[in-house]
Image (tube, rainbow, N blue to C red):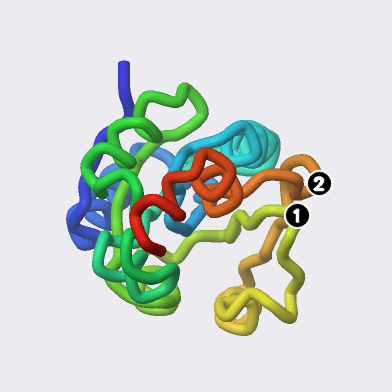
Amino acid sequence: MSAPILLDAASAQEHLAQLAQSPTIGLAVGCFDLLHVGHVRMLIAAREHVDQIVVALNTDASVRGLKGEGRPLVPLKERAELLAALRCVDLVTSFDAPTAHDLIDLLRPQVLIKGTDRTLATVPEAEQMASIQGQVLFLGDQKSRSSTELAARSGFLHRSGT
């Protein structure tokens, strides 16, 4: 069974509020364009630290703003479906901004899940998480994969003009 896909963040917040217990919520945010093993390893590692894993995907427009024309390679609804199919993911939502500040205000996660390629200095939401007594966890294997690198290696980005 797949995790619910509630692309409207307010619906995601309502869903989390209806959970019977007070679970520890972990929020992973990003493009997740061309899902790869690094993404999966990060999410699996997060399960050891949180009860509910919420993946918030950048909308197609915000991915274009962050990564440029020709991105995302996979549209939002398909990226959501792929992530919802992962056993370790409990909910998939989306956000349409370059950072997840508003989403964090809405969902109030206890943990922000990031890959090992990031540091507190490179996570724009780190100070916000500290202000709500949350934490930022850097999980998964050492960064050796990226969607951009995979797309470039496949020749897709070159062919598409980006």
Left of 145 or right of it: where is 58?
Answer: left
Q: What element carries label 1?
A: loop
Could you tell me residue 85's position as x and y percent?
37, 24
Residue 16 is situated, as x and y percent measured from the top left of the image, at 32, 48
Residue 16 vertical placement versus 90 (above, below): below
* Residue type of the residue flagged with mark 1: Thr
Q: What element carries label 2?
A: loop
Label 1: how many residues lie within 10 Å, few (<14), some (14-19) or many (20+)? some
For disc 2, the neighbor class at 10 Å (few under 14, some 14 to 19, many from 20) is few
Which image quadrant: the C terminus? Answer: bottom left
Mark 1 or mark 2, which is nearer the start of the sequence? Answer: 1
| Circle on res. 161 | none
Q: Does 80 sit above or below residue 134? A: above
Task: Give 125 or 108, whichever is nearer the viewer.
Answer: 125
Pick whichever, 18 or 47, lies toward us: 47
Q: Which residue lies furthest to the top in this view?
A: 1
- Using the rendered view, name the quadrant where residue 82 is placed: top left
Residue at which label 1 appears: 116
Tell me the distance, in whole angstroms, between the alpha carbons under discs 2 and 1: 6 Å
Residue 74 image position (x, y, % from top left): 31, 44
The image shows residue 63 at horizontal and vertical percentages of 36, 65
Q: Which residue is drawn at 56% across and 77% down?
A: 125
In the rendering, which numbered label is found on residue 142?
A: 2
Regarding residue 106, the answer to whether it shows in the image is: no
For image coordinates 44% across by 76% down, the residue present is 99
